[in-house]
Amino acid sequence: MIFQNLVKGAVVAAFLASSVGAVDNGLAITPQMGWDNWNSFGCDVSETLLLQTAQLIVDYGLKDLGYHYVILDDCWSVGRNASNNNSIIPDPKKFPNGMAAVADHLHSLGLGFGMYSDAGKYTCGGYAGSLGYETVDAKTFAEWGVDYLKYDNCYNMGQAGNQQISSARYEVMGNALNATGRPILYSLCNWGEDYPWNWGSTIANSWRISGDVYDSWDQPDSRCPCDGPDAWNCGLPGFHCSVTNIINKASFIVSKAQPGAWNDLDMLEVGNGAMTDAEYVAHFSMWAAAKSPLILGNDLRKVPAKDLAILSNAAVIAVNQDPAGSSAARRWMYSTTSSDVYGGNAIQMWSGSLQSTTGGTYSDMVVVLINGANESMVLNATLADIFIDNGASGTAPQVKMSWEVRDLWANRMSESEAQAIIDATSAAPNATNATTVGSGRYNATQTSYAQGLKNNDTLLLGNVTSTVGPSGTVTATVDSHGAAMFRLRALPTGMKRDEL
Ligand SMILES: *[C@@H]1O[C@H](CO)[C@@H](O)[C@H](O)[C@H]1NC(C)=O
Ligand SMILES: *[C@@H]1O[C@H](CO)[C@@H](O)[C@H](O)[C@H]1NC(C)=O
Ligand SMILES: *[C@@H]1O[C@H](CO)[C@@H](O)[C@H](O)[C@H]1NC(C)=O
Ligand SMILES: *[C@@H]1O[C@H](CO)[C@@H](O)[C@H](O)[C@H]1NC(C)=O
Ligand SMILES: *[C@@H]1O[C@H](CO)[C@@H](O)[C@H](O)[C@H]1NC(C)=O
Ligand SMILES: *[C@@H]1O[C@H](CO)[C@@H](O)[C@H](O)[C@H]1NC(C)=O
Ligand SMILES: *[C@@H]1O[C@H](CO)[C@@H](O)[C@H](O)[C@H]1NC(C)=O
Ligand SMILES: *[C@@H]1O[C@H](CO)[C@@H](O)[C@H](O)[C@H]1NC(C)=O
Ligand SMILES: *[C@@H]1O[C@H](CO)[C@@H](O)[C@H](O)[C@H]1NC(C)=O
Ligand SMILES: *[C@@H]1O[C@H](CO)[C@@H](O)[C@H](O)[C@H]1NC(C)=O
């Protein structure tokens, strides 16, 4: 009885959180998905790049997996127009048809248009920033048909240093976007300065939690300080942050993620070439489990087949897009060497509740086992640790039950199938041949992830690999720098409900 009351209390709290705590624009009810040019192109932006990439997002079936926003990052403008309310002027060489034309084209493909600006005097690339010009810029973006704003933090004129100052600066743009009347997803990007996870949800749909990611699993870099147990309190966000550095920073603030408002672990590096396949699998798994926005950061014109296969894994995306909107949490982390870099060589176990697909009282659970060691290892997650939030020291009722263990990477598209999709697209550009080749894949345009989960679609649930009995252990052999990811579903043979 006590347990059921607790569950009801949690449900009420979650409802209040999502209806009261999150910004009220109806967007990012699940973490946003899309593509941003920055990680692979930096300032080298143009209409051609955005439209070519948009077409590939369609042809490769990525749109039908949920990747929706095509986000233009920094370096697209040439200043302000004094004879037109100081409105910002797009670079006519990079965008010869103007921004509204880009928006129209993207909308005709069923995609959304993401724009970039900066809550400072200049953008990070030294172009005009929006500080002091929030109203005119928001209005201009809305007129162009923009659906998303990534809002950076360079040259902020010292308007930072505590939560009130930073939140006030970012709130001006939030209010300006709202005042346009156009729903525009607001992606706050102040790199985790002044604890945006405490105030971001009332202003924006997501907030970055760290300095910029780079294409490395665990390389320490002095320019991205703060690792280890105090990383949540990082005075200097820096940049060149490794995947393990960012996972560590996320681990402290997972409870802040909620429908409409997400911790942003930064754009994906999958496909950019400097990590191993196992590392990219672990990177994608963790971004999904921590409910980060999933924003592709690679050059889709030359995506390796194995990376397209990672980015196309609907079973992993379904965890990210789960209707319950609750981030997994780290349950333990242990060093595997004496000369350890915190997080780098460690093994970790994360778990978190997902909406039930068994129709019962008990949530499904996602379990991620991460192996930071320099060798393949057998990792073990006990039910007692997986369900520790439901009762410490193995007292959770879930520990006394049996669970189906489903491998979320078992149905990863084969490299040859991914290659066939890429080949069909290059043979017939802008046709839909490629998506025909991949016709066995999940189509979230047709059937939402929420509905697909209700239907028990195996493309989303993964393959059953084993069952784990009462007080049992989930075990997996995990590659060096890789991850295993499972969905646990309650089996009806557990304890009777009366016993609760
Ligand atoms: C603006 O904010 C109000 C109040 O929070 C909300 O009801 C409305 O949907 C918002 N509109 C847009 C376009 O974001
Ligand atoms: C395909 O679409 C892109 C973007 O709209 C365009 O630039 C390109 O010319 C098209 N290619 C062909 C062969 O139609
Ligand atoms: C500046 O605004 C004026 C008045 O709307 C317009 O005629 C002119 O074309 C604009 N200049 C640029 C470079 O956009
Ligand atoms: C510029 O100001 C004029 C007059 O106040 C207004 O009608 C117009 O909508 C403004 N344009 C923008 C882009 O804000
Ligand atoms: C999904 O699977 C669960 C557990 O096996 C079952 O109870 C439920 O009826 C299934 N739902 C559908 C729509 O098949
Ligand atoms: C990892 O292991 C390989 C051999 O298995 C070895 O060559 C390499 O030096 C090791 N790297 C580290 C960082 O220990
Ligand atoms: C997991 O359990 C197996 C079997 O008991 C054991 O061999 C292995 O060392 C364990 N892994 C770790 C990391 O403790
Ligand atoms: C997973 O199940 C599907 C069918 O449901 C099957 O085609 C596929 O081969 C299985 N994968 C593995 C790794 O067992
Ligand atoms: C693409 O599809 C069209 C019509 O659907 C077909 O005629 C053409 O042969 C296909 N091309 C390839 C390379 O599959
Ligand atoms: C996915 O579903 C949508 C809507 O039904 C459809 O237009 C699209 O062609 C489908 N995509 C694929 C790859 O079949």
Image (tube, rainbow, N blue to C red):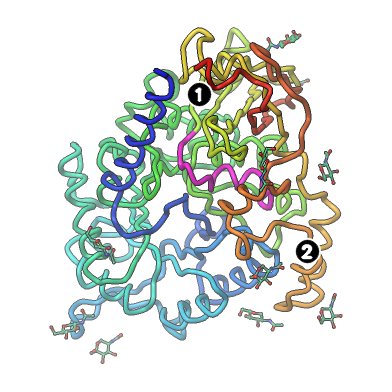
Q: Which residues are magenta?
A: 311-327
- The residue closer to the viewer here, 55 or 74, is 55
Q: Which amino acid does the dot numbered 1 rest on? A: Arg
Q: Which quadrant of the figure shows ligand 8?
A: top right
Direction from residue 475 to residue 397 in the image, left or right: left
Query: Which mark is in front, 1 or 2?
Result: 2
Question: Which badge, 1 or 2, comes first in the chain's sequence?
Answer: 1
The answer as to whether callout 2 falls within 8 Å of ligand 10 is yes
For label 1, the crowd category at 10 Å Cα-Cα, with few meaning under 14, some 14 to 19 and many 20 or more, is: many
Percent x, y for residue 277? 73, 39
Q: 325 or 55: nearer the eye?
A: 325
**Residue placed under numbered mark 2 in the picture:** 439
Q: Secondary structure at mark 1?
A: strand
- Mark 1 lies on residue: 330
Q: Nearer the viewer, residue 308 or 65?
A: 65
Q: Please name the amino acid that badge 2 sits on.
A: Ser
34 lies left or right of 255: right
Instruction: Kindly check if marks 1 and 2 are in contact, taking CB atoms under 8 A apart as contact.
Output: no
